[in-house]
Image: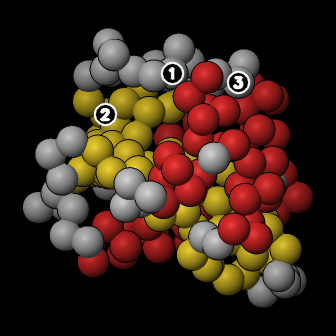
Amino acid sequence: MAVIEIVEFSDEWSADFASLNYEWIERYFAVEKHDREILDDPKRFVIEPGGQIFMALADGAAAGTVALIPSAGNGLELTKMAVSPNYQGRGIGDSLMTRSLEWAKQKRVDYIFLESHRKLAPALALYRKHGFVETPTDPDSLYVRADVRMELRLT
Protein backbone atom coordinates (compact mmCIF):
# COMPACT_ATOMS: atom_id res chain seq x y z
CA MET A 1 0.00 0.00 0.00
CA ALA A 2 1.33 3.42 -0.96
CA VAL A 3 2.30 5.91 1.73
CA ILE A 4 -0.01 8.95 1.39
CA GLU A 5 1.32 12.40 2.27
CA ILE A 6 -0.59 15.70 2.05
CA VAL A 7 1.66 18.61 1.05
CA GLU A 8 1.14 22.28 0.28
CA PHE A 9 1.35 23.42 -3.30
CA SER A 10 4.58 24.39 -5.02
CA ASP A 11 5.24 25.10 -8.70
CA GLU A 12 6.46 21.55 -9.28
CA TRP A 13 2.87 20.33 -8.81
CA SER A 14 1.21 22.71 -11.32
CA ALA A 15 0.95 20.18 -14.14
CA ASP A 16 -0.39 17.48 -11.80
CA PHE A 17 -2.95 19.86 -10.28
CA ALA A 18 -4.22 20.60 -13.78
CA SER A 19 -4.16 17.05 -15.14
CA LEU A 20 -5.93 15.51 -12.12
CA ASN A 21 -8.76 18.00 -12.52
CA TYR A 22 -9.00 18.02 -16.31
CA GLU A 23 -9.30 14.23 -16.12
CA TRP A 24 -12.47 14.18 -14.00
CA ILE A 25 -14.06 17.30 -15.48
CA GLU A 26 -13.71 15.94 -19.01
CA ARG A 27 -15.06 12.56 -17.90
CA TYR A 28 -18.31 13.99 -16.48
CA PHE A 29 -18.76 17.49 -17.92
CA ALA A 30 -17.34 20.07 -20.31
CA VAL A 31 -14.35 22.14 -19.22
CA GLU A 32 -15.50 25.70 -18.58
CA LYS A 33 -13.69 29.05 -18.78
CA HIS A 34 -13.29 29.35 -15.00
CA ASP A 35 -11.85 25.81 -14.85
CA ARG A 36 -9.17 26.81 -17.35
CA GLU A 37 -8.32 29.99 -15.46
CA ILE A 38 -7.70 28.15 -12.19
CA LEU A 39 -6.06 25.05 -13.64
CA ASP A 40 -3.79 26.84 -16.09
CA ASP A 41 -2.64 29.53 -13.63
CA PRO A 42 -3.13 28.29 -10.06
CA LYS A 43 -0.64 30.76 -8.59
CA ARG A 44 -2.63 33.73 -9.92
CA PHE A 45 -6.11 32.43 -9.15
CA VAL A 46 -5.52 30.49 -5.92
CA ILE A 47 -2.19 31.15 -4.21
CA GLU A 48 -1.66 34.89 -4.79
CA PRO A 49 -5.14 35.89 -3.49
CA GLY A 50 -4.27 34.06 -0.25
CA GLY A 51 -5.58 30.58 -0.96
CA GLN A 52 -3.94 27.18 -0.82
CA ILE A 53 -3.72 24.01 -2.85
CA PHE A 54 -3.02 20.68 -1.23
CA MET A 55 -1.59 17.72 -3.09
CA ALA A 56 -1.97 14.13 -1.98
CA LEU A 57 1.16 12.20 -2.83
CA ALA A 58 1.25 8.41 -3.01
CA ASP A 59 4.88 7.34 -2.64
CA GLY A 60 5.83 10.75 -4.04
CA ALA A 61 3.48 10.73 -7.05
CA ALA A 62 0.48 13.07 -7.33
CA ALA A 63 -2.66 11.10 -6.45
CA GLY A 64 -5.11 13.86 -5.54
CA THR A 65 -5.60 17.56 -4.97
CA VAL A 66 -7.91 20.26 -3.62
CA ALA A 67 -7.89 24.07 -3.73
CA LEU A 68 -9.15 26.70 -1.30
CA ILE A 69 -9.80 30.16 -2.75
CA PRO A 70 -10.61 33.22 -0.61
CA SER A 71 -14.19 34.42 -0.96
CA ALA A 72 -16.35 37.30 0.30
CA GLY A 73 -17.15 37.68 3.98
CA ASN A 74 -14.07 35.88 5.33
CA GLY A 75 -14.96 32.70 3.47
CA LEU A 76 -13.24 30.14 1.30
CA GLU A 77 -14.38 28.27 -1.76
CA LEU A 78 -13.34 24.62 -1.72
CA THR A 79 -12.82 23.67 -5.34
CA LYS A 80 -10.88 21.48 -7.72
CA MET A 81 -10.94 18.39 -5.54
CA ALA A 82 -9.79 15.41 -7.53
CA VAL A 83 -8.39 11.97 -6.82
CA SER A 84 -6.86 9.88 -9.59
CA PRO A 85 -9.00 6.85 -10.45
CA ASN A 86 -5.91 4.72 -9.68
CA TYR A 87 -6.06 5.88 -6.05
CA GLN A 88 -9.76 6.20 -5.34
CA GLY A 89 -11.20 4.26 -2.43
CA ARG A 90 -8.12 4.74 -0.25
CA GLY A 91 -9.33 7.67 1.87
CA ILE A 92 -7.37 10.30 -0.05
CA GLY A 93 -10.38 12.58 -0.52
CA ASP A 94 -11.06 12.33 3.21
CA SER A 95 -7.42 13.21 4.00
CA LEU A 96 -7.50 16.19 1.63
CA MET A 97 -10.73 17.42 3.20
CA THR A 98 -9.38 17.04 6.74
CA ARG A 99 -6.24 19.00 5.86
CA SER A 100 -8.30 21.70 4.12
CA LEU A 101 -10.52 22.16 7.17
CA GLU A 102 -7.48 22.34 9.48
CA TRP A 103 -5.96 25.04 7.26
CA ALA A 104 -9.22 27.02 7.15
CA LYS A 105 -9.51 26.91 10.93
CA GLN A 106 -5.90 28.09 11.32
CA LYS A 107 -6.80 31.03 9.05
CA ARG A 108 -9.86 31.72 11.22
CA VAL A 109 -12.20 31.53 8.25
CA ASP A 110 -15.92 31.94 8.99
CA TYR A 111 -17.24 29.53 6.36
CA ILE A 112 -16.32 27.31 3.43
CA PHE A 113 -18.60 26.79 0.45
CA LEU A 114 -18.41 24.57 -2.58
CA GLU A 115 -20.34 23.97 -5.75
CA SER A 116 -20.83 20.53 -7.21
CA HIS A 117 -23.21 18.39 -9.22
CA ARG A 118 -25.72 15.76 -8.11
CA LYS A 119 -24.17 13.06 -10.29
CA LEU A 120 -20.99 13.21 -8.17
CA ALA A 121 -22.56 11.18 -5.34
CA PRO A 122 -19.29 10.03 -3.70
CA ALA A 123 -18.09 13.64 -3.51
CA LEU A 124 -21.38 14.83 -2.04
CA ALA A 125 -21.22 12.05 0.57
CA LEU A 126 -17.68 13.14 1.52
CA TYR A 127 -18.80 16.75 1.93
CA ARG A 128 -21.76 15.73 4.10
CA LYS A 129 -19.49 13.52 6.22
CA HIS A 130 -17.42 16.61 7.01
CA GLY A 131 -20.45 18.69 7.99
CA PHE A 132 -21.30 20.54 4.78
CA VAL A 133 -25.02 21.21 4.27
CA GLU A 134 -26.86 22.18 1.13
CA THR A 135 -27.75 25.83 0.63
CA PRO A 136 -29.54 27.53 -2.27
CA THR A 137 -27.54 27.50 -5.49
CA ASP A 138 -25.86 30.70 -6.61
CA PRO A 139 -27.58 32.21 -9.67
CA ASP A 140 -24.28 33.98 -10.42
CA SER A 141 -22.17 30.80 -10.26
CA LEU A 142 -19.18 30.76 -12.57
CA TYR A 143 -19.98 27.11 -13.42
CA VAL A 144 -22.83 26.08 -15.71
CA ARG A 145 -22.62 22.52 -14.34
CA ALA A 146 -23.14 23.50 -10.68
CA ASP A 147 -26.52 22.26 -9.44
CA VAL A 148 -25.54 21.87 -5.78
CA ARG A 149 -24.10 24.43 -3.37
CA MET A 150 -22.96 23.37 0.08
CA GLU A 151 -21.58 25.30 3.03
CA LEU A 152 -19.82 24.60 6.30
CA ARG A 153 -19.88 27.30 9.00
CA LEU A 154 -16.70 27.36 11.06
CA THR A 155 -17.71 30.18 13.46
Query: Which labelled disc corresponds to residue 134?
Result: 2
Q: How many numbered tags mark residues here?
A: 3
Q: Which residue is mark 1?
A: 143
Where is residue 9? Give x, y as percent: 60, 70
Tag 1: residue type?
A: Tyr
Q: Secondary structure at mark 2?
A: strand
Q: Residues within 10 Å of mark 3 (few under 14, many from 20)?
A: some
The residue positioned 32% from the left and 21% from the top of the image is 137
Quick check: can you spot residue 24? Answer: yes
Q: Which of marks 2 and 3 precedes in the sequence?
A: 3
The single residue placed furthest to the left in the displayed view is 155
> In this orientation, does residue 83 appear?
no
The alpha-carbon separation of the residues under discs 3 and 2 comes to 24 Å
Q: Amino acid at mark 3?
A: Val
Q: Dot 3 corresponds to which residue?
A: 31
Q: Position of residue 6 (x, y in %)?
A: 62, 78
Q: From what the image shows, is residue 79 above or below residue 129?
A: above
Q: Position of residue 53 (x, y in %)?
A: 54, 63
Residue at screen point 36% across, 75% down: 102
Mark seen at residue 67: none
Classed neighbour count for the residue bearing mark 2: other residues with Cα under 10 Å, few (<14), some (14–19), many (≥20): some
